[in-house]
């Protein structure tokens, strides 16, 4: 049984139900050979749907759940690999930085690759400080405006937005010595 067979069976079941209802109305509720035949057809279609139809849909659902699990597992593996590669990149840059500090150089160039000292600055939102100052005010205002008490208020922003508004008191900034990496250029074609 395929999906289209289920759709067709459902349409047939609906048609038989209407037909059967009309026959009962027409015959003032009396059971006739025709109503018995329609009842038998309706029962057969119902049995088909609740048997083969349900099994087909169950197999389809199981295969999709299995597919979803596979995609999630593969995503988890990819995420771990990405994290590992990023850690390796950070490690290599730290080693180059260590070499540059040990040799006192600001720029180093091998035969193919070069590195220049640089400083990496990352900013993150200090959510605790933001909540400490604004959460009670925002919650009170939202509840006064009609937000039900069973709904929580959460403050959310980004470091970029805070910088744009000059609200740097809610930023935590971390600076790290690092290097800029220059790769060899490809040849002209």
Image: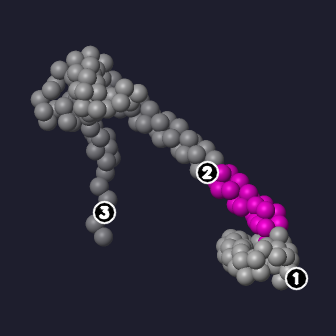
Q: Does 64 lie within the magenta span?
A: yes
Q: Give the left or right position of residue 138, taking residue 58 as reference.
A: left
* Residue under pointer 2: 68
Residue 90, position in %: x, y? 39, 32
Residue 49, position in %: x, y? 77, 66
Q: Is residue 46 above or below residue 91?
A: below
Q: Earlier in the sequence, mark 1 or mark 3?
A: 1
Disc number at residue 22?
none
Dot 2: what SS?
helix
Q: Quadrant of residue 159?
A: top left
Q: Quadrant of the C terminus?
A: bottom left
Between marks 2 and 3 in the image, the one whose residue lies nearer the viewer: 2
Q: Does 10 lie within the magenta span?
A: no
* Residue under pointer 1: 33
Q: Is residue 164 above or below residue 38?
A: above
Residue 148, position in %: x, y? 35, 30
């Amino acid at each position: 049984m395929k999906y289209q067979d289920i759709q067709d069976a459902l349409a047939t079941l609906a048609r038989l139900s209407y037909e059967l209802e009309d026959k009962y109305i027409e015959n003032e509720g009396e059971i006739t050979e025709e109503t018995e035949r329609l009842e038998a057809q309706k029962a057969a279609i119902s049995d088909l749907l609740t048997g083969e139809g349900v099994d087909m849909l169950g197999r389809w659902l199981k295969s999709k759940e299995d597919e979803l699990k596979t995609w999630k597992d593969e995503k988890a593996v990819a995420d771990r690999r990405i994290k590992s590669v990023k850690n390796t990149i950070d490690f290599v840059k730290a080693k180059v930085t260590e070499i540059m500090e040990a040799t006192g150089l600001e720029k180093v160039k091998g035969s193919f690759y070069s590195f220049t000292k640089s400083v990496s600055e990352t900013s993150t939102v200090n959510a605790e400080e933001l909540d400490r100052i604004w959460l009670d005010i925002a919650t009170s205002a939202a509840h006064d405006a009609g937000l039900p008490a069973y709904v929580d208020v959460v403050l959310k922003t980004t470091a970029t937005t805070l910088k744009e508004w000059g609200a740097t008191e809610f930023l935590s900034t971390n600076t790290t010595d690092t290097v800029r990496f220059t790769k060899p250029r490809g040849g002209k074609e």
